[in-house]
Amino acid sequence: MKCSLISLLCLLGLSAGSLWANNLVIGTPSATGGNLQFTIQWDNSWNTTIGPANYDAVWVFVKRQVCGGAQTWDHSLLSVNSGDHSVTGGILQVDAVSDGVGVFIRRSAAGNGNISSSTVTLALQTPTNSTDNFQVFGVEMVFIPTGSFIIGDAVSGYSFSVMSITAATQAAGFAAQGNYGNSAWGSTGTPSLPASYPQGFNAFYCMKYEISQEQYVKYLNSLTFTQQNARINFSPASATGTWAIASASPNNARNGIRIMTPGTALTLPAVFGCDLNGNGTFNEAADGQNIACGWLSWQDLMTYLDWSGLRPMTEMEFEKVCRGAGIPMVPGEYAWGTTSLTSAVSSALTNGGQGSEVSTASGAGLSAYAASNNTTFGPLRCGFAATAATNRTQAGSSYYGVMDMSGNIAEQCVGGYLFNYGTFNALNGDGSISSAGLFNTANWPVSGGGQFGGVLRGGYFSYPNGNELRTSDRTPMVWNGNQSKQPFVGGRGVRVP
Ligand SMILES: [Ca+2]
Ligand SMILES: [Ca+2]
Ligand SMILES: [Ca+2]
């Protein structure tokens, strides 16, 4: 749930600080010389040595606008030495990464609960001159430790053959076995995965939630006019209230992202905001900022991830996040490890569109999918099923505490027919996209669809039965529809630290 401070700051139009779903609050940064300082706080943080033996973290990255010239928001690299960064309060630590694209901030010892406001000081690779503007972005992540795990369950649609992913398979690659797709696309076969392909054995971080509409708005607002134009349906110079990524009719599937202030062609980018309730006033408490963001094509998601310094997950990483390492496979299981399933739909909500949005339904395996086909449904708030009182099954949580892996918005993953895309090598985004508004990381699949390497996993809010929600279901592999924007398609990113 989000605090009132979030909507207040959005109403005031402040852009220097960044405020995300589920109570992650990053204060307005100030830069002096080589240092950038800001506050951070978030709720429901953990570091546990039992069970999943993992922790949550916030991936923090910085954009800088040099005043004068083009005034674009460019990625600002950080020191690669953890000791150059600091955080107050004695609870957290700052972990640098080897490419300097951001840092992870996390609990340094076992514990759980809310993180109260702590002051972070980051070391910039390039010192500021006094006129630079900075934005700090934060994404809640979950650490997925190194470990062997099982892929496939032999009963779900197009399941991998059941096998263990281990240090040995990762080091040597392996010839995959199972059902690899659509006979219309050619013969089935036994694809061979090289050692460079991330099978999920090695540790990585995974976003705790699907990308929210507020996160996507903040991203769009940092792009140039030309970049925005490549990523939205209409010109950024269109009138206030124009939908940005949803189609104009007949159903926007609860996407509230619209043009708030029109841009000027080629020179001044538009300012986007959320107006889910359609009353012309942006970023109100009920304007859906914390709802998961649909309408993201494969290229939309890849571009967001490159800009964020993240990368897409592979299908095998998806199964590890859901099932857990060293955990027995339950045939037909969902992300919470059982075959229990309770439908939550957007027509039966309490506090709809607000940061406190919840389903009126409750029960084991509560997740956003439709028990019957209904094209007026949309996604729910990121992590809607979790409260302080819910267990893993009631919250619809994965083994590691990642939310909404079964249901809500379909997750776009690398994989698909004949294990495309075998040259994918786990390269992270570098924080920069092309001036034309497209991702440019080497060896990421360039196109969505099971045939081209960008497939869907985990089902979605309007899917009329639970089959595709299953951890090992690969049915959408025979579909290429996510080459364009679809209301139920979005996703999340991962990163090898
Ligand atoms: Ca509104
Ligand atoms: Ca999902
Ligand atoms: Ca890039």
Image (spheres, grey):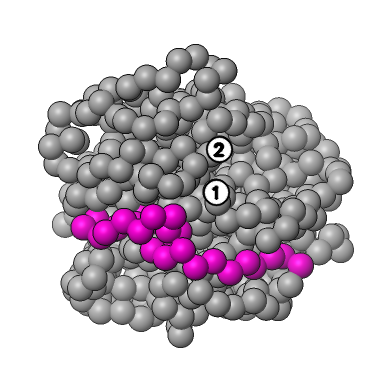
Q: Amino acid at mark 1?
A: Glu
Q: Amino acid at mark 2?
A: Pro
The numbered disc on residue 468 is 1
Left or right relative to 302: residue 96: left
The reply to whether callout 2 and callout 1 are in contact (CB within 8 Å) is: yes
Which residue does the image show at 41% across and 72% down from the upper left?
392
* Magenta stretch: includes residue 330: yes
The quarter of the picture where residue 57 lies is: bottom left
Identify the image quadrant of the N terminus. Answer: bottom right
* Magenta stretch: includes residue 344: yes
Residue 365: x, y in percent?
51, 69
Which residue does the image show at 30% across and 43% down from the upper left?
162
Q: Which residue is mark 2?
A: 476
Count up the numbered dots: 2
User: Which residues are drawn in magenta?
Assistant: 321-347
Left or right relative to 301: residue 138: left
At mark 1, the secondary structure is helix
Residue 225: x, y in percent?
67, 33
